[in-house]
Image (spheres, rainbow, N blue to C red):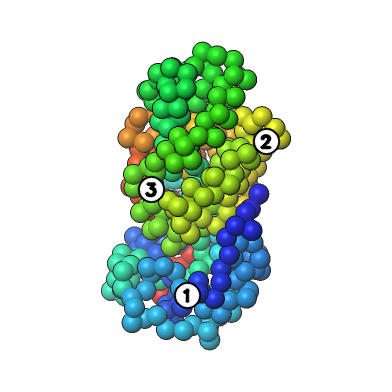
Amino acid sequence: MAITSTFSVGPKDSFLLSNNKGFQFLSCVKFLSTSIAPHGGGGKYPFNNLTNLRLWGCCSNDSNISCAGNNNKYMNGFQRAQVLLHDAKEASSSSATKDTNNNSSHRGSCGGFFNQDLQDKVVVAVDVDEVLGNFVSALNEFVADRYSAYHSVSEYHVYEFFKIWKCSRDEADIRVHEFFKTSYFKTGIRPIPGARQTLQKLSRFCNLSIVTSRQNAIKDHTIEWIERHYPGLFQDMHFGNHFALNGQSIAKSDMCRSLGATVLIDDNPRYAIECAQVGIKVLLFDYENSYPWSKSESLNGHPMVKKVHNWGEVEHQLASWIVPRNSSPK
């Protein structure tokens, strides 16, 4: 579910657009035109009620000029989707019309980005545990202190804790919910290196939303953690409530489809296959090749799944998948 009550935009958060250039995106990629129904306001950001917006970091200070005259161009928010390339041949074909003038793209703090309308954002779903934060490492510390059971990340050949801890599934669920009540969970999970910096760049040409299997019982703490370490980067947060003691669960593929995501960044091969089967491209995240559970041979060569080993590779792969809707920068 979208946590519309948690985030809002007020007058102090209404930023100015640059005078006539809009938003700036990677100059090395091209966009292919497509359109869907506009958002029409509501949700996290009531764009129909705003008159001026500026994307953080995408304009130099001397270009922060009011764009009220062009407001009707931007008021409907982030809902015109981009087409993603499915193979190298398609990418080669689309690049035939690559522009030859990049001089206007290097402006302000956005060198290497070209101007692109706000509506043309790709919707990207981002997992939390092991993608944004090191959940298993913090959990191992708790289990060691509480149960005198010592495990390393390298032991988790599957992301099913009862198999690693050699206990029943119910017992494992109880231990994890005990973990949720401790400081090991609330303050002990550290962000994955490079994630925040990369997401700040991606937010310029992607709509980012959290899609996690986390339980409803820890929704509030998850929101607090995300806002502490990744402030203002995510449009919505969706919780699957998997492995919960109470309530129904929601499949990741259903959550992704409900928000119109065309890409999922996740560390779990099971979710990668599930989403790839319904046409969602997946970046299978295996941080520095250190996640045993991410190494599924069944995904090798899968046309919808690309393995990545850090957030720099995430940025590079997303850029290679996105096809600009215009044949040249404005």
Q: CA distance from mark 3 to mark 2?
A: 27 Å
Residue 330, by quadrant, is bottom left
Look at the numbered disc 2 and give the secondary structure of its residue: loop
Residue 18, by quadrant, is bottom left
Q: Residues within 10 Å of mark 2 (few under 14, many from 20)?
A: some
Residue beneath disc 1: 15
Farthest right residue in view: 247
Q: Which percent across, then down, holds residue 3?
A: 62, 54
Farthest top residue in view: 166
State which tag comes first along the sequence, 3 or 2: 3
Residue beneath disc 2: 249
User: Is 42 rendered above or below residue 150?
Assistant: below
**Residue type (three-letter) at the residue carrying disc 3:** Ala
On screen, residue 103 versus residue 125, left or right, reads: left
Q: Nearer the viewer, residue 273 or 128?
A: 128
Q: Is residue 233 visible?
A: yes
Residue beneath disc 3: 195
Q: Which percent across, then down, holds residue 46?
A: 62, 69
Q: Residues within 10 Å of mark 1 (few under 14, many from 20)?
A: some
State which tag comes first along the sequence, 1 or 3: 1
Q: Which percent across, then down, holds residue 183?
A: 47, 37
Q: Is residue 297 visible?
A: no
State which tag comes first along the sequence, 2 or 1: 1
Q: CA distance from mark 2 to mark 1?
A: 38 Å
